[in-house]
Amino acid sequence: MPHERSESDRGAAPGAPGVSRRGFLKSIGTSALVAAAFGTKTVAKDLAEPEAKRELGPGAVQVTLTINGRSVTYALEPRVTLLEVLRNQAGLTGAKEACDRASCGACTVLRDGEPVNACSVLAIEAQGSDITTIEGLVAEAQASSATGRPLTKLQQALIDADGLQCGYCTPGFVIVLHALLKKNPYPTEAEIRQACAGNLCRCGSYPRVFAAVLNASGRTAGSSVTIVNPSTHALA
């Protein structure tokens, strides 16, 4: 009569008497779980250490910013936005606080040459960047002007074309379009419209803004840009 193997003998790994397939697989699974748990703890520890070092606040911390070429240090809570620092600490009120949710462009400044909404950038995040406000364009204008007039060519073109009414949104438009002309000195009207698509003018001065940029670049306004004569302007 053949000998009937016990369950523990069935499927025993060759060369490993007394070790069943089930036990063998269980041991592998247990080892894998232990290794995974150990690896997870190691990764968590590695991530926690730098996070702990970066922990700032909730009290004020030292924040150093480069604004219009000048390095300044303020004691700020990490929650403070770049716009709040510019207006309340630096006294640069050209960037306006309007929507406070990055949807109107009135607070636009340049961060390393790129337009950003200052209301949506934490001051602590702007460390190490070059911040340029509308006030910061004065030095550049004076350097490029034979008469030393503190206006860029674009700003003068906006005045000449009457490209502003209440003027609240104008600094944001100037910053965005200044960045455009830096990258593309001869933009088309479509490119101008695209560049300032995120800037809202509640007075509706868009046609004159577009015309001013075209004039500043040496182009002429197309037929799609309707210019109202200043003498017949509603606010003239």
Image (tube, grey):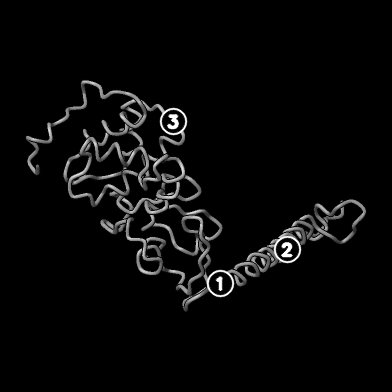
Q: Nearer the viewer, mark 1 or mark 3?
A: 3
Q: Amino acid at mark 3?
A: Asn
The numbered disc on residue 184 is 3
Looking at the image, residue 24 sits to the left or right of residue 131; the answer is: right
How many numbered callouts?
Answer: 3
Q: Secondary structure at mark 2?
A: helix
Q: CA distance from mark 1 to mark 3?
A: 41 Å
Q: CA distance from mark 2 to mark 3?
A: 63 Å
Q: Quadrant of residue 95?
A: bottom left
Which of marks 3 and 1 precedes in the sequence? 1
Viewer-nearest residue: 93 or 78? 93
Give coordinates of residue 105: x percent, y percent: 31, 49
Viewer-nearest residue: 219 or 30? 219
Looking at the image, residue 127 sits to the left or right of residue 185; the answer is: right
Residue, disc 2: 30
Q: Secondary structure at mark 1?
A: loop
Give coordinates of residue 47: x percent, y percent: 64, 65
Give coordinates of residue 155: x percent, y percent: 32, 42
Residue, disc 1: 55
Classify mark 2: residues with Cα within 10 Å, few (<14), some (14-19) or many (20+). few
Q: CA distance from mark 2 to mark 1?
A: 37 Å
Q: Secondary structure at mark 3?
A: loop
Give coordinates of residue 194: x percent, y percent: 34, 34
